[in-house]
Image (cartoon, coloured by chain):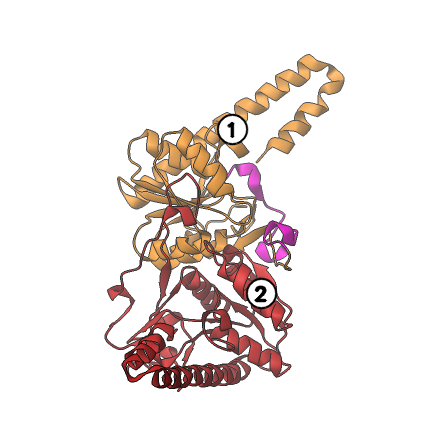
Chain colours: A red, B orange
Amino acid sequence: MNLARGARRTAQLLPDGPGAALEEALRVRDEEIAASEAMATRGADLITELCGRAPRMLTHCNTGGLCSVVGGTALGVVLELHRRGTLRDVLASETRPLLQGARLTAWELTRAGVEFRVAVDGAGPFLMARGEVDAVVVGADRICANGDTINKIGTYAHALGAQRAGIPFVVVAPESTIDPDTTDGAAVEIEDRAAEEVTAGFPAANPAFDVTPSDLITAIVTDRRTIRPGRGERPDA
Amino acid sequence: MNLARGARRTAQLLPDGPGAALEEALRVRDEEIAASEAMATRGADLITELCGRAPRMLTHCNTGGLCSVVGGTALGVVLELHRRGTLRDVLASETRPLLQGARLTAWELTRAGVEFRVAVDGAGPFLMARGEVDAVVVGADRICANGDTINKIGTYAHALGAQRAGIPFVVVAPESTIDPDTTDGAAVEIEDRAAEEVTAGFPAANPAFDVTPSDLITAIVTDRRTIRPGRGERPDA
């Protein structure tokens, strides 16, 4: 999210005194809240358009208020559908190795009074194949100029499942996530993290993020617009 | 595997006295060992034919001696490639929720002196996309008449990853796994297991197995033959 950028913006005003910094911090907060609400509204509208009245949603990792403000990004869309009374079911993938789905998303959905089930990451594509999911919504760490999307490891596997099941795969992220200087996913170095996150005592391959090619993405919803890579639309256009 | 069938065969001879039952039990054991070795040889030959000299393999769940005899099924192929000195790398997917990969496969590979890395289930397809895997080998709980394969949850997601990466996806299982009376995967009821396996305190969707459609399977290797569903070959033919 934009928290680091917001902190930088605020810190730059510290020489002008605490009043100026506080004012800027509140402005950052208000912008973030407005962006989150805009994504929730636009995303929920799109999901309703794509899926009809009562969608069953799957989401990966945590994209709610805990990593952002108010509803966050992808989870904000789920919560908005719930507020509208048009949400039928939610699956939260547990998101190994750090279990952001099973811990944070589960906590946020419980707090919001939304019924949900946790699924292991390997089950998501099969639950789609079995006809139990109408759309997948995820966040983004970074979006390349062509729409390739870097997000928490496991996102790509869910995108493959959605494509095979013929259901929408929607990325929800603020406009600031789009990096027009990164041509595509092949240009991105993915960090491999410590084996200890995955397993005690054995070596591990532990990429923290993965790349979802833009052809698997039905739509990218930002706070300002909806981009449809499948129709040849590009984030950098 | 055939353990239940072997136990039944042995138990049927108990009325003839312990000698007859023991003789049958040893026969069952010898047949299982021969089947495992036949699968290992045929599977390793096929992987070498498909991938060239030094393949990097990914396997899911546990399919080694702990669930069978000697090398087991899919893991037996990996071990045979290692014995031949032509194995370059092994990734073992951890296999949530019960972690058969991170616990059992990791233990068996260590014991056999094979270097490997564990990966979370959500990482497998991305590691394939990044070009780090040459072939995927898995076992089977049941193989339908058309080649659709029922196996541990997460298998299907790995098959989607292999297809997209353009690498072979090979099922290794004894002939007895083939069920000619089950037309296809749609006819199979998949058991949903207790939420407690996945998460403490939240509801869960926990299918124990999934269905990999035969069009995603490059080959099925049994103790008697190699079936190539992609070429229109059927297990029940």
Counting from the top left corner in percent of width and height, residue B67 is at: 54, 34
Q: What's the magenta region?
A: B173-200
Counting from the top left corner in percent of width and height, residue B63 is at: 49, 38
Q: Relative to A71, is A159 above or below? A: above
Q: Relative to A75, is B26 above or below? A: above
Q: Is residue B216 visible?
A: no
Please give the label number shown on residue A38.
Answer: none
Whole-number angstrom distance, CA of label 2 to CA of label 1? 44 Å
Circle 1 chain = B
Circle 2 chain = A
Taken as a whole, is the magenta stretch helix, strand or loop? loop
Please give the label number shown on residue B69.
Answer: 1
Left or right of B107 on screen, residue A176: left
- Amino acid type shown at disc 1: Val
The secondary element bearing badge 1 is classed as: loop
* Residue B186 on the magenta span: yes
* Residue B170 on the magenta span: no
The secondary element bearing badge 2 is classed as: helix
Query: What residue is drawn where x is 60% and y is 58%?
Result: B186
Counting from the top left corner in percent of width and height, residue A228 is at: 39, 81
Residue marked by disc 2:
A107
Label 1: how many Cα within 10 Å (few below 14, some 14–19, many 20+): many
Q: Quadrant of the N terminus of chain B?
A: top right
> Please, which residue is most extreme toward the front here?
A17
> Please, which residue is most extreme toward the top here?
B19
- Give the camera-side residue of B72 and B217: B72
Label 2: how many Cα within 10 Å (few below 14, some 14–19, many 20+): some
> Residue B10 appears in which quarter of the rendering?
top right
